[in-house]
Each structure stands twice: as structure tokens, then as C-alpha cells.
Image (spheres, helix red, strand yellow):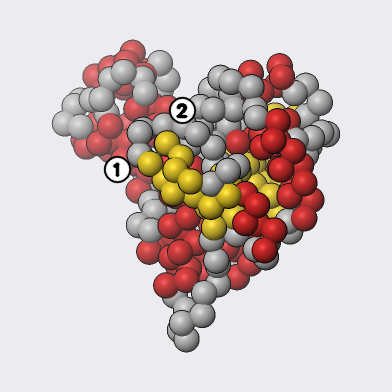
Amino acid sequence: MAFLVDQQVNLLDLCSPLQTFETINQFSEHGERRYESLVVSLHGGLITSSCGQKLMTAPIAALDDFPLDTLIITGGRAGVEHNEPAQLIAAIARLAPLARRTCALSTGVFLLAAAGQLTGRTVSAHWSWAHALQQRYPDMQIDSDRIFIRDGTIWTSAGMTAGLDLSLALIEQDYGHGMSMRAARQLVMFIKRPGVQSQVSVSLAVQSSGDSQFDDLHAWVASNLCEDLCVSRLAEKVCMAPRTFARTYTQRLGRTPAKTIEAMRLEAACRALENLATPLKRIAAKVGMLSEQTMHRAFKRAYGI
């Protein structure tokens, strides 16, 4: 597994997946390593990250003697604000077809696109760079909502913490769902997110409203979706009269409590639906939608499906 970095690399894009794969190595019972990782740059030597830390790298030529299974191209400010180095692009164009799978995290997608590997593909991109990416490379379809996307042998992600989710998906592809979940627990992740998960969750969206009065309530709701979340119950949690709570909530967040709860339940249902073995009836009950019919109507109303 090779991590390709350049100057101004985003440390989360590198360290999150690097630690995730090393976590899997720690589970080995007989000392064998499931993943061997190598961090490379164009010429090797010290690379300066976007936050000023120095990283020692091997030259990209070292991959000529390295069994390249997975190539991960990290993101950072370089490659977006500046022209991509021609030598680096040529190296990616040469190496990507040799790897079993190639991944681009965050703005690393610019490098992979410049290397001609994304023509006609559907890719994920960090929401703040999606427009610039589409203008520069109009011959691919960009989804700036999903946290990661697999299109054939190409994987792309929004980067940052989404690199954790993509890494777990790669582990699941290699060693199964159980090993992926074991790694997620070891990393103390709140939830293992599927690729269809939005880059901005419902909980984060309501927290971003600029009013923190109901943050604790939203956290409690997210952990108790299967309960009866009527207005009177919610009002009790924040020590307000039901009518005062409903009016205040709507005024401050721009949506009713019922709309927020339905959105959170739909988001939880989307995550649960990735496990195809779970019956719809059980998913509906788990997220508090009472019945399959209720869930069907909610999906139709929200997503048209």
C-alpha cells in the first residue's frame, strides 16, 4: 500500500488511513502484517505538511521494487492552488493502472484527474472544491455530497475524516465486515459511515444554525430515535413548555422539531440499509418509523424513491 504525498499535504488525509491500516496489523494473531505501507513523494526526503510538520518520505521510484496493491493519493493545498507538477502527474498515470485499486482523498482527486484516470467516472469531492474541480475537468461526474465513491477500481473521498470511512471500506473489501467493524471500534469511531452518507450530517447541519441551545437535545435524539419523540417529550428534556418549545425551536432553527427528527431517522435508515441482510421491518423499528409503510412514505417524500 503506497501513500503518495506532495508539499502541503493534509495530515488527516495521510494519518487517518495510515493508522487505520496499522490497526488491522495489530489484530494479527501470529505476527503477520496484513498491510505494508510506504509513504512516497516525487523525489523523496522531507515534505512539509499544511500545518508545518515535516514528514520523511521515500522517492516515488521506490515503488518500482514495491508490490503495489493500493495507491492512495492524498490531498492538500498544493495541486489546487498551483499547477500540478508534470513529473508527478506522469508518475501517477504510470502507476495507477498497475495498482489493484487507486484512491484519491480530498484534493488528491485533482492529481488523479490530471493523470487522465477519471474521464467518464463518478467521483466524490470535498464540497468546498467540487465547483473548481468540475470547471477544470468537465468530463467526469462529481458528487459533492457523498463522503466516498467507488467506481470500478477507482475510489475517491471527500478527504479529512472521510478518509477513515474509505479506509474501513477498503478493509471490508479485503477482510470482511467483521474486521472493518473491529477496526472502527478500536479507533473509537462514533459510527461507521457508508459511502452514501452525506458530507454534512443532519445533526451537524442543525448544530451549524448558529444557536447551540438545542445541541444536547439533538445528541440525545440521535441516540434515542426508536423512542416516542413527541413535542411534549422533547420539551421536557429542555425544561420548556411544549408550545413554547415548538415555537422557539422553529424560530431559531428554521424547521419544526418533527422535520428534524424525520431527517435524522431517514439518515439512520440510510446507514442501516447498507446491510442488505437486515429486514426492512427491523430497520424501521430501530430508527423509530414504526412500520415499513411509514418508512416507505418518508423515503418517497424526502428522496422520491
Q: Is residue 269 left or right of residue 102?
A: left
Query: Picture coordinates of residue 62 (x, y %)?
Result: 62, 56
Query: Picture coordinates of residue 41 (x, y %)?
Result: 56, 44
- Mark 2 crowdedness (10 Å alpha carbons): few <14, some 14-19, many ≥20: few
Residue in the picture at 38% in, 51% down: 190
Q: Work out whether residue 87 can be spotted.
A: yes
Q: Looking at the image, how many numbered discs can be counted on the residues?
A: 2
The circle drawn on residue 92 is: none
User: What separation in Å lies between label 1 and label 2 (alpha carbons)?
Assistant: 16 Å
Q: Is residue 28 left or right of residue 142?
A: left
Which is in the foreground here, disc 1 or disc 2? 1
Q: Could you tell me which secondary element the residue under label 1 belongs to?
A: helix
Q: Is residue 170 left or right of residue 187?
A: right
Callout 1 touching callout 2 (CB < 8 Å): no
Where does the N terminus fall, quadrant-wise? bottom right
In the displayed structure, would residue 109 be above or below residue 275?
A: above
Q: Could you tell me which secondary element the residue under label 2 belongs to?
A: helix
Q: Is residue 294 left or right of residue 234?
A: right
The circle drawn on residue 220 is: 1
Question: What residue does disc 2 label?
Answer: 259
The foreground one among 89 and 58 is 58
Where does the C terminus fall, quadrant-wise? top right
Label 2 is placed on what type of residue?
A: Lys
Task: Identify the image quadrant of residue 228.
Answer: top left
In the displayed structure, would residue 184 be above or below residue 245?
A: below
Label 1 is placed on what type of residue?
A: Trp
Query: Picture coordinates of residue 78 (x, y %)?
Result: 54, 27
Query: Picture coordinates of residue 293 (x, y %)?
Result: 63, 46
Residue in the picture at 47% in, 71% down: 25
Q: Earlier in the sequence, mark 1 or mark 2?
A: 1
Q: Work out whether residue 281 can be spotted.
A: no
The foreground one among 224 and 198 is 198
